Structures are given as C-alpha cells and as structure tokens.
Amino acid sequence: MNTLSANADSLWSTLCIKLKHSVVFIDNVSSEILHWNGGLTRIVKAGVNDVREFSSFERALPSQKKGVFIVSSLLQNVTAAVIQDIIQSSQFQYVIIITTVSPYTHALCKSSIQGADLPNSAGQQIFHQFEDNVLEWLGNLNYTVEITHVPLSTITVGENLFINPAYTEMFPLSKADVKEIDLRIRAARPEKTTSCLPDLEISQLPRNLQTLYKMFVSSFNDILEQLSVKEDIYSVGHTSRCIAMELENYGPAKSRRKNCASKASVIFVDRSLDIVGAVGHQTETLFDKILSILPSLPGHIIDRNINMESMRPDSNVSEKPVSSDEPAIAPGCLVSAYDENERDLINILIKNNQKEAMSEINASVLQAAVEEKLPVKVAVNRNIVDSIKSTLNLFKGRYDVIQKHLAAIQVALAAVQMSNHPSNSHFKHLQGMEKVILQTTAEKNVSPLSEISEILRMCQSERHKPHEGRLYSLDDIWCLLLYCYSLAGKDRYLWTKEEQGLQAGIVKEILIELKNLPPITKALVKDNHTEGTVSVIVQGVWEKLKGLGDAREDLKQFSSVLKAGDESSPPHYKSILRQIVELVFDPNKVDLVDVECKTGGLKDLLKTGFGLFMNISKPRPNDHPLLIIYVIGGITTTEVKQIKDMMASLKTDTKILFGSTQLVNPLSLAMSVLCENRMNPCI
C-alpha cells in the first residue's frame, strides 16, 4: 500500500521541475505543507530565484520573467484577484498556476448541476477560461500560461497521522447553526423548513459552506487516490453524514473505486460530539504539551516557535522561550528539512508518554555530542531536563555542528523551553480543576458551574496583577465551560440558576477588563463595548455551549463520555473515539447502531432483491486491512496515542490511519468553537 508521505515527496519532486528559474508566490496553507515536505531549501535547490507571499502587495522584479503561483483554493474571487494584481504589477512572460483543488471540483462548485450528473472531464474548460484571463493580464496572447492541479493537501505529522490545513475552518454544525440555516431557507422558500440537524442536507447550507465541503471531499478523494484504495464510508455525527454522502456521490471517487483493487474503510467523526479531551489539559504526549505551551511559528498552524538564541556562545540554554507577542531574533522549529531523523523525532513526541519522550530526546542529543567528540559528562540521578540542558550547552557557538544535528537540537530545545515555561504551573492548575469538575459532574445532583463561578471570583480578585501573574483568565473560564458542557451532555437540569449568575458575572468582568482582555475573549467581544452588546455575545456563547451539550442526543451507544465509577475505580472520561474503536473491534460484533454506513454496494444489492437469497452480513469498518478515522474539527496526538495503545492489545491485522482538519490544543479549539464563523468560511 502506498504511503501519504512517499506520495507527497513524489508530488513535490515533480512540481519542483516546473519551478526552475522562477519567482514563486505561495499561499500560507501551501507554504505550511511545503514546510513539512522539505521546506524552502527544497525549492531553492530546484532552482527557484525568489519566493514571495501570495499577496496583492507583492510583485516580481522586472528581470523575473517566469512566475509560479501555488495556491490551495479555487481560482476565483479573492484568489483570482490576487493573481491578477501580482501579474499586472510584474513583467512575466511565462506563468504557471498550481492549485490543490481539482478541475472537477471547480466545475462542481460553479455549477448548479448535481455532482452525479457532471462528467469527470468537467472543469478543464474553467481552467482554459482562466488561462485566457491570465493572457489578457499579461498583455500579450503569445506568452505562455499553464494551469495544473497537483493534490498537495496533506501534512503527514507522524507515521499514522495526517492533517489537511486548508480546512481548519471546518467545524461540525450544531443546533444553534440550524436556527440560522432555517432563517435563510424560510427567506428564500417559506414553505421549506429545517427543524433539526438530522434533517439537514448539504444543499441547504450557505453557498460558501457548501463550497468548502466540496473542496474537502475533492482533497479527501485525492488522499484515497494516493493510497490506491476503494472505500466503504461510515459516519458518526450529522456533519460527517453530509460529508460521507458527498464523498459517496463524488464523480471522480466513483471512477477511482472501479480501478482500485485494495479496500479500506473510512469513518468520519464530528469533533463536536466530544471535545472534552481536546479542550482539556490532560495531555499524555510531549507533542501536545509543546503545542499547548509554546507559541506558533509565525504563519503556521502546527509547528512551534523555538528560541535558538540560546545556542550563541554567550547565552544559556535555560533562557526563557519566545513569547507569543515578541518576535524571535533566531526562530527555530520542530521541522526544518524533515529528513528521516526528523520523522523519527516527531514520532517520539507523538507515540510515547512524556517521560519516555524526554528520555529519548536526551539520548538523541547525547548521541550527537558523542559523535562530535564533545566533552560529555553523564551525571547520575540528574533531572532529565537539566541533563538535556547540559548536553545542549556543549553545542553553543559550534554552528557547523549545530547545522549537522539541527533536528535533534531543535526538538531538545523545544522540550527544555516547554519544561521551563512559566505557563506550566498554570497548566497544572487547570488539570486539577478539570479533575474536580469531572468528579462533580459525575455526582449529577451538584452543578460543576459552582467551581467555575469560584474561578471567576478569583479572576476578579486578581485584577491588580499583570496577566502573566494571574492564576486564571477569562479564556480559561471559556475552556472549562466547554469541558463542562461536552462532558455532561444532556445531564444539565440543575444548572439553569447558576448559568444566569455566571453569565452576569462574566459580562461584568469583560466590561471592567475591556482594555486588557485575553485573546479568545477579545476575539469574541471585538469592538462591542456596551453592556447590552456584551450580554448578547455571552448569551450567544451559551447557545453554543448548549449545542455542544446536546450534540450526542441522537446517539444510543455513544450517548455519554462520562463513565460512572464504582467501589474500585472513580468516575472517568472515555473519549468517543475510543468507544467507537472498541465497538468496531468487539469480537462479539455488536451492531454499530450509531455508525452510519454510506457504502452503495450493499444498499444496491438489497435493492435488486438478491439480499433475499444470499447470506449477507452488514459491512463493518474492520472488514478491510486499512481503517481511516477522520475527525472533522480537530484531533490531538494524545487521542491517537491512546487508541494505538489500545490496539496493541487487540489481535487484529487492521491498520488505523488518523486524519483531521487540524491539530488542536485547548485554546485553539476554544477559538474555533466560540469565535470562528463556521457558517460563512472564507473561500
């Protein structure tokens, strides 16, 4: 079976042939994908003269006659306008445009015809029309224009985890969204209504959201094409059901299934069914801890900003890490060239627990120091972080040696800076509070909102302190509320009175702290500074919280993620992903009531009547050698590790591959749920 990383490497190698002697304009998503597949070094070695941001404010030098555009979007609207601006500001004679969206999807998004009725060749005409437009912008019809589709949509983070960064805005719809959709439908067709999520169809969604879903299906079909498999499709959750139906009926997918011999199963899962583990702070992997504590590398979603200044001869490795609001003079990252050594190091961060990962990182920098014959001193019983620091200090100022072992040194610095970060104590406080909330929620006759009200009172008492000196912030309260409502589900009948008091307290705190709000709260409030508008915003947040609490109301087998304790064990959280995998691989082959199958084969067979004469069993996701679990809305490496650990105890030959729209940490997921406009994404 083909691997996604090998296919991505092959695609970039082919693409690099087109880049020679060109100036490349690349958008943020494509830039991040390139970063994980050889980075800037790769395309510079291919003969690129210059690399610039994909922006209307950029242009090529008069001497640069060949321009290449690499974009992750449809060739329309803003993307088309930016290409036009750059071309008309430059003096190109040869233009190549590379989009990760297929020609068929361009036609599908532009046409009102159902996807099943479009020929697979549809879309080439749109590319030809755009070529004509580009020639007009160039001002000479004798110049050369090429437009091509290259399916570069994935980042392979670990050996069994991939991310599609173009779709970070995708998050499952909730009850609160249905009200908005219903208003849109009534305005256009008063006789039509959509009263609940199970009735929702993709054709009823806003145009931009439909387009985003169709683009995603195109990218996912490219992934299955690269793996050379035909799939059985399953879904858990209402948004996943819409995506599954769209993939089942996607024209190029039907053609692919006819030509592939290998089989796989795909389960799409809505993140909104369970955000407890993702918005919580009970991380098991070092990768998740680094993502939660260190700031993002500028312009990136996954990689982190590592302070490399400490490798100067006159500095100390224990220097504080880069602040999220301060630019780094010498920024490092987890991935630089993504060679085999880096792949191994990233896998260490993902598949091991934090203690094991720190030990292996220590061993990797020790090995590098020994190879370079540096004066290594191994101290017995030394703290592992101090041991890594001591070894890193040996590399200071030795830039040729640092370059040789850059991957190991950057990952080691990330581990040290994460361990020394002042946010660690804050992180531990939140871990403790989540455990208290879990125990309180399990009692059912007590509301966990009383614990959060107490945190709000602590915030109020610490107003005189600078932000970094406070124990909790309003953003922490949002994360804990998301944790509460998703954990409790429908068991919230005692919360109403405390909800009102907590809402009023949060509104008051926002109005007092308007000039000093943390990021999520600031994104929520924007320029609304009156009590009335802030109250409406907070009420809107509560609608989203209740929507998360109701997300599992239609499920029977996965209706709860809070498992009651007994005399021998306390109550505990059990993720919906783990529950799904356990049930799929249950040796008793229990009916998968909540896992909806969208595969056409069995359905068509039953329609013909052959099902009456044949012994047909229902398909199961573990029928095939490959199972892809794709979480719409974000995943954590802790969740991946937990399922991998569980699978190790099962006697099965099925390989599980995990995918998602993004890797999340508590704050990034809270921002996605509460602040982003999921109904009208930017296309």
Image (cartoon, rainbow, N blue to C red):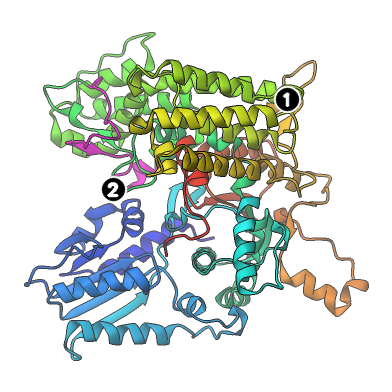
Residues packed near mark 2 inside 10 Å, few (<14), some (14 to 19) or many (20 plus): many
Quadrant that contains the N terminus:
bottom right
Of all residues, the one furthest to the right in this rendering is: 613
Q: Residue at x 53, y 27 (%)?
A: 505
Q: Is residue 87 left or right of residue 201?
A: left
Up-down relation of residue 478 to residue 582 (above or below): above
Give 276 or 580, whichever is nearer the viewer: 276
425 drawn magenta: no
Q: Quadrant of residue 241?
A: bottom right
Quadrant that contains the C terminus:
bottom left
- Amino acid, disc 1: Ala
Residues packed near mark 1 inside 10 Å, few (<14), some (14 to 19) or many (20 plus): many
User: Could you say where residue 79 lies in the image, as x and y percent from the top left?
Assistant: 33, 69
Find numbered disc 1 in the image and state the secondary structure of the residue it sits on. Answer: helix
The numbered mark at residue 337 is 2
Q: Is residue 344 left or right of residue 590?
A: left
Q: Is residue 559 left or right of residue 210?
A: right
Residue range in magenta is: 317-344
User: Which is nearer the N-term, disc 2 or disc 1?
Assistant: 2
The numbered mark at residue 442 is 1
User: Could you say where residue 106 lies in the image, as x and y percent from the top left?
Assistant: 45, 77
Q: Quadrant of residue 64?
A: bottom left
User: Could you say where residue 127 lies in the image, as x and y percent from the top left?
Assistant: 37, 82
Q: Quadrant of residue 201?
A: bottom right
Q: Residue at x 29, y 80 (%)?
A: 146
Q: Is residue 666 left or right of residue 565?
A: left
